Amino acid sequence: MPINHLNQTWILETSTTAYALGINTDGLLAHSYWGCLLPRLEDYPPPPVREKWASFNNAAHLTPEEYPIPHGMKFTQPGIMVRFADGVRDLRVRFDSFEEQKGATPELSMHFQEEHYPVRLNLHYRLYETEDLIERWVSITNFGDDPIELQRILSTSWNFPSGDRYRLSHLTGKWNDEMHLHRELLTPGIKVLESRRLTTSHHHNPWFAIDEGNASEAQGRVWFGTLVWSGNWKIEAEVTDFDSTRVHIGLNDWDFAWQLKKGETFTTPPALAGFTTDGFGAASRKFHNHIRDHLIPHGNTPHQVLYNSWEATSFNVNETSQTELAEIAANIGVELFVVDDGWFHGRNDDRAGLGDWWPDEKKFPNGLTPLIKKVNDLGMDFGLWIEPEMVNPDSELYRSHPDWVIHFPNRPRSESRNQLILNLARTAVRDYLFTVIDNLLTTNDIRFIKWDMNRNVSEPGWPDAPGDPREIWVRYVEGLYDLWGKLRNKHPQVIWQSCSGGGGRADLGILRFADQIWVSDNTDATARLSIQEGFSQVFPAITMESWVTDVGKDLLPLEFRFHVSMCGALGIGAHLAHWSEDEQKEAAKHIADYKKIRQIIQFGDQYRLLPTKNDGLTAIQYLSKDKYEGLLFVFRTFLPDPINPQRVFPRGLNQNAIYKMDVEPKPRSGKAWMETGLQFDLENFQSSMRYFHKIN
Ligand code: DGJ
């Protein structure tokens, strides 16, 4: 049974893991277990109760609370903080009831009643049994007449077995250099990771993994999680003075406030997490499966090979420049031709035009239709770039509605890339954007949209907000989801890509709307190797758009650049007209190869065999779900000679099946390949792709 209930304890079971909680004898909802599935329900520990230890700590302080509620004497991190109308800032809740919902993704809701005020707090759980994942979120309803101020409301606290040797893995970076993996031991205190930028950010990603300091890619106990949200977020990894380790995750409480009025409910975004004994690789694959099977709108459709003209023509977009590129793109096998920035009204550089989403009259005197027709006649679909959330002060939109941007009165409006942010919390703004983008998609045959967002917030004001203006942090993101959702529903034929100057909005929240993420503006293939590896901790290859460009071409062979991009959804971003005939021919061959194997990459399991930190030799494997066929990609960056390259050991193969590996003369059993590995003798900046398949 996925959800089991025994005397005020609840045991949530997935295919290989279990999570247990219960009301302890002090009346607190305590966490009691998260780990491997145990044979009998009686095997799970009861909800813990800890004795009061000293006058400096009360008993509740010592107990791993399922969702820490701040009342009495507690100094650990709370899940929630409220202020009642009479000034009371203390929340006391008592367990009231629970409900269970059966189905493909079973749910448990637990209801708690405030002891004095007419307020109900609900903890929600949803199980994804096959992927061993648990989703948690919280809602709170005000049944009283007076508003309540929410000052902090996280989605969840995840508790780990008592101990003080936990290691935190997380992803950090910056624009053009996202998604670097860090691992560090947690020590008493709080490690904070967050975004205050209105979007998820290039700087940290709302993902964590916790292990006992000894997990590897292939083995070890790992707890891992993320937040399904695209705005300000916070992770607090806390080790208490009693060696209790928790990860709190949810909306950032920095500058957060929410007026919960009579009859209203506030619901947090979901937090998703899982447990595995099979190391970081298995943790990633569980998220990959979940994202593909439950989140992205077109999880069963392979991505087309696309061409994007941004690095070739920048803002110099017109029918002639794009047709020249489209003809070559079609010749080498591209399936989708995407026109990036520069096509719309008044857009000749980044100083003007954002907001005016109709074709520039000088560049496209007859609209986009003639170009789209040419692209379609060449056998390709057509895609377009937009940046709906932004406006240049030099635009017709801003001249008509200067009050639509996020701003404080009596303060300058700080521009970044000469642009300001439209306040998507406002209905009028969303209505305008829906109308113009809907019109664009209705009057043109557009099959792909790259949705960009090229700055972070400043002066986060909302002068005529109906409630507390600080609600903007949440209402903006809800507005974005509302707008994107309506456009998606009206135009289901469109594949959407989430871009925010590269990977500034890479999260599970946006992947309910977008099928792909533009991971980084950095298209140097060697830099890309580690950015892509960081990305793969959370996201599957199908969501990773990756272009072959001219960056680093003097050092990096075209094949190397192709191999790096073939590890995701392949795209080309180079100036094709500058490629020689030989280069075009070689590109055509790689594209044809990719089309044959993309099923394995986009829908298979990914294994990070040799991580990029491995001194210049990186190896990645993709294996079809039925273990019938797979691919090995190996990259050598710079390694001073002489070297004796490490062997590459495939993983996940069917042990007794016989596999034939490209180039290698002799077929061998899966077990033999995995135990003895392969040697790749590569030169500096050389790469190799090997296909293998079962022969029995
Ligand atoms: C930032 C994106 O990441 C680039 O790929 C490109 O679309 C530019 N914006 C266009 O302004």
Image (spheres, grey):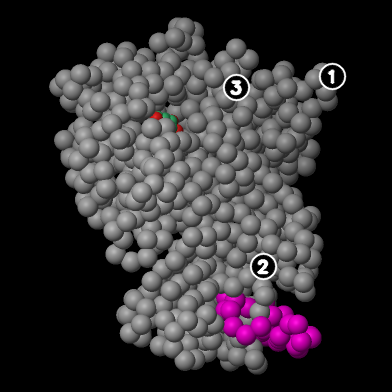
Say which element carries label 2.
strand
Rendered image: mark on residue 146: none
Task: Report crowding for label 3: few under 14, some 14 to 19, many 20 or more residues within 10 A (C-alpha).
Answer: many
Residue located 35% across and 27% down the image: 351
Let me know if residue 49 is in the magenta part.
Answer: yes
In x, y percent, where is residue 475? 36, 59
| C-alpha distance separating marks 2 and 3 | 42 Å
Which of the 4 quarters of the picture holds residue 363?
Answer: top left
Specify the farthest residue to the front.
Answer: 410
What is the count of numbered marks? 3
| Residue 566 visible in the displayed image | no
Q: Quadrant of the C terminus?
A: top right
Rendered image: mark on residue 560: 3
Residue located 47% across and 81% down the image: 87
462 relative position to 187: left or right: left
Let me know if residue 296 is in the magenta part.
Answer: no
Rendered image: mark on residue 246: 2
In x, y percent, where is residue 509? 44, 54
Q: Which of the two labelled residues, at mark 3 and mark 1, occupies the earlier sequence position? A: 3
* Image quarter for ligand 1: top left
Closer to the camera: disc 2 or disc 3?
2
| Residue 19 visible in the displayed image | yes
According to the image, label 1 marks what residue? Answer: 642
In x, y percent, where is residue 136? 51, 69
Inspect the image, locate mark 1, and give the three-letter code of the amino acid beneath it. Pro
Magenta stretch: give its range. Answer: 45-73
- Residue 637 or residue 395, whichever sits in front: 395
Say which element carries label 3.
helix
Inspect the image, locate mark 3, and give the three-letter code of the amino acid beneath it. Phe
